[in-house]
Image (tube, rainbow, N blue to C red):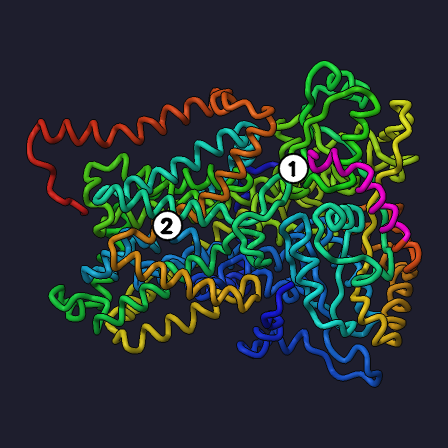
Amino acid sequence: MELDAATLAGLFLHAFSLWYVIVPAVLIGIVMGAIPGFAAHNTIIILLPLTLAFDVETALVFMVALYCASHLGGGVPAILVNIPGTGGAAATTLDGYPMTKKGEAQKALALSFVASVLGGLISSVVTLFALPYLSRVGYYVHSVEMVVVMLFGLALIASIAAQDMLKGLIAGAFGLMLGSMGADHIYAAPRGTFGLLELFDGVPLVPALIGLFAISEALVMLEETSIVRAEDGAGARPVDWPATLRNVAYACTKWWHITWCSLLGLVIGVIPGAGASIAAFVAYQQSLFFSKTPEAYGRGHPEGVVAPEAANNGVTTGTLVPLLAIGVPGGSTAAVMMVVLQFHGFPFGPRLFVEAPGLAYGVIVAMAVSYVLMIPMIFPMVRYLSKVTVVSTLYLAPLIVAFTLVGAFVPRGFVFDIGIAIAFGLIGYVARKTGYHVAAILIGVILGPLIERSFILAMRISGNDPFVMFSSAIGNVLWVLLVLTLVMPYVLKRLRERSGPPAAEGAE
Amino acid sequence: MLSHPRLPRRRFLSAAAGTALAAGVGRAAFAQDYPSRNVHITVPTGEGGGADRDARTFTKVWADHMKTNFEFDYYPGAAGQVGYEFYMQQEPNAYNLLFSNIGPEVIMLTLQNVGIDIGKDLVYIKKTSTEPMAVWVGPSSPFKSLEALVDEAKKRTVTVSVSRLPHPASIGMLALGEATGATFNLVPFGGGNPSAMAAITGEVDCCALPLANPISLGDQAIVLGVFADRNPAPDEANGAPAVNDAMGTKLPPLTSSRAWGIHKAAIDKYPERIEILKTTMQETLDDPAYAEAVKASGLPTAFIDVGNQEAAMAEAEATRELAIRYKDLLTGG
């Protein structure tokens, strides 16, 4: 199948004709993505009996639309109430919530939605044309390179900890320790599980995320009557249509930031085993590194919202590349899509492009069309969702606790996980009250097991030669970039100090 | 063993959400007592893997014979131990079944001292398919034959991606190394899909997995050898030879069978339910629609291998003996 203009037009028109499948899927995806625990993977699993009853094209279009929308939805609670709906939105809290606290929730939502939609759209279109090249990424990025990529994410701990390095590093180390719990990757020997079977597969991410962010935030929230500081007068700020349009237009001015962050997310998404969490943390860290105003990050910097949201939506198409190009799913959501293809007797990998090219390219086109169909939804969401912030915390906090505890239960169906969420909630609350950053703990919990797995694989393959970490050209380039990433901020800071007073906090 | 309560997830969600979906998958009461509700299936590996594929292929046809629907839960982790332990905590009422992969899971139960005794605690009541282990390479690999791979492994350590160490494919590679003087370094990638990816992208030299895996990958995988007396699917597996034929070794056949497992307590308490399960499973296996479904899922029908409880349990016992024999190699002991 040649991808000429006529074919492409046909594919896009056909995808648009499936609007009645895409629109409900997008709505479900946004809502589910916004509730921690109900992210795309779990929602798709829950709805699998339904999608298996559809024909294969409808099923795949429904799933990809839901998948894309859930990444957009995950940013909503991250911004409004400091609770990421998905692991990929955890980095969004770093600047999204401070913007909300400053009374700029509407602006933050506009940034998040525009970054998600544009980022997803750009990466889908790029994937459509560059699929053969993207599929080669997996041939060059192996365990060694993955170790370095994840170290970029871990380096974010140092950035977060800039204000109090000791506490930041302690929080990060604590997260890494928690992340090392569970069966080891070689002999499946349990470590630090206290004999609890529920911990054999490691600390479950969703309950940990819910506890650290949602439960602890609800407890902190109860100390105030409203999320927004009264002195910011956010309640009085207009949330009319002109303001909505202005905010969306402002978000569109960040198009270049959105573009490169989404492409970064796409490349990371292509790597099997990587995912939205890694992409979002790395994009945030890189955004901070290249920023002229790095000191404004963590205090409500617009680009601190744009970077992770563009990246985690860039990941969406990336995770499909290994499934489509090679035949091996790159992530859990792609694995479920593979089940649907198998169930209907369709091949996957290169054979799908030979036997059903319309379906293979159609999946990617459906992603692009899903993002296009999300555009009209941005405006009402930007206008009305920000009103959540003026709801009294007396109502908001219990609602958050109730919803998120159900979310903690859903992925694995263990009552135990509700207990995990509560325990992490208490840890998070103590951390917040004592100045330890919960995001640093979470980065350790998320990236710890991933980096350990890649490290052990690399060591095992090399026969336990530590120099394997410097054995590949791409890996060595990444090492250099990592060192530059860590060192350059201090060099630049020194240079700025010498050349005059620091730039104004130009978060704009 | 844990004793705290665990709510069935699907039931909880159905009740909590009251969704149309829940209504859709519900079923009217049938005249017979069993099954009067959905049957719950535990898969001790992740969704999207070979077990998931095979369980869904089977239940697609079985639903017509059992007159019920099926719900799936996945419990990967600790080489299948997590799934088995959670399954054993479920009520032994014949509404809870385990879809097992006898080879790797019996080896895991034997090596990891899980405390679940096959025969006393859990019984495999029906075998549905059997496939041999295979060693294969990616399309850009320099190794075009098993002999070339083994020759290379005599000069240097050859890396092999495997899904986990306690697995018949791992035993196959270690036994091959022992018999030929070759050195294979097994690298457990934690699942069939990542293991396959490592071989295809050249991160490792070759991959050892059940034969269905390379077959499902089509041109992306070149099978070099099959750990069985013969290659049961030569057309789909590029005519790869049996390892013993190619290398002149005398390795035992290394196969694995999909089988339905159930609590021994359920067999003792509800013999009539077990009879219904066995009868309808056999009807499914005899149904031409099942062979069609297997074919549609991309697998050769030659893998369909019907076996009753005695056959399934005999295979489990043979696998246990194999695990004990190669225990030191698999545990580094």
- Identity, as a three-letter code, of the amino acid under mark 1: Pro
Between B29 and A107, the one nearer to me in the picture: B29
Outermost residue on the top side: it is B155
Q: Residue at x 50, y 56 (%)?
A: A204
Between B42 and A425, the one nearer to me in the picture: A425
Q: Position of residue B197 (x, y in %)?
A: 63, 36
- Callout 1: SS: strand
Q: Over which residues does the magenta segment extend?
A: B314-333
Query: Same chain for the residues at labels 1 and 2, yes or no?
Result: no
Query: What label does residue A90 carry, if any?
Result: none
Q: Position of residue A220 (x, y in %)?
A: 27, 66
Q: Disc 1 marks which residue?
A: B188
- Identity, as a three-letter code, of the amino acid under mark 2: Ile
Mark 1 Cα-neighbour bin, 10 Å: few <14, some 14–19, many ≥20: many
Q: Position of residue B273 (x, y in %)?
A: 85, 75
Q: Residue at x 37, y 57 (%)?
A: A75
User: Quadrant location of residue A7?
Assistant: top right
Q: Disc 2 marks which residue?
A: A441
Q: Is residue B208 visible?
A: yes
User: Quadrant location of residue A322?
Assistant: top right
Q: Quadrant of the N terminus of chain A?
A: top right
Q: Is residue A484 above or below residue A441?
A: above
- Callout 2: SS: helix
Pointer 2 indicates a residue of which chain? Answer: A
Q: Residue at x 23, y 56 (%)?
A: A98
Query: Horizontal placement of A451 versus B151: left or right?
Result: left
Q: Residue at x 22, y 67 (%)?
A: A239
Pointer 1 indicates a residue of which chain? Answer: B
Residue at mark 1 to residue at mark 2: CA–CA distance:
28 Å
Between A342 and A9, the one nearer to me in the picture: A342
Q: Is residue A190 above or below residue A99?
A: above
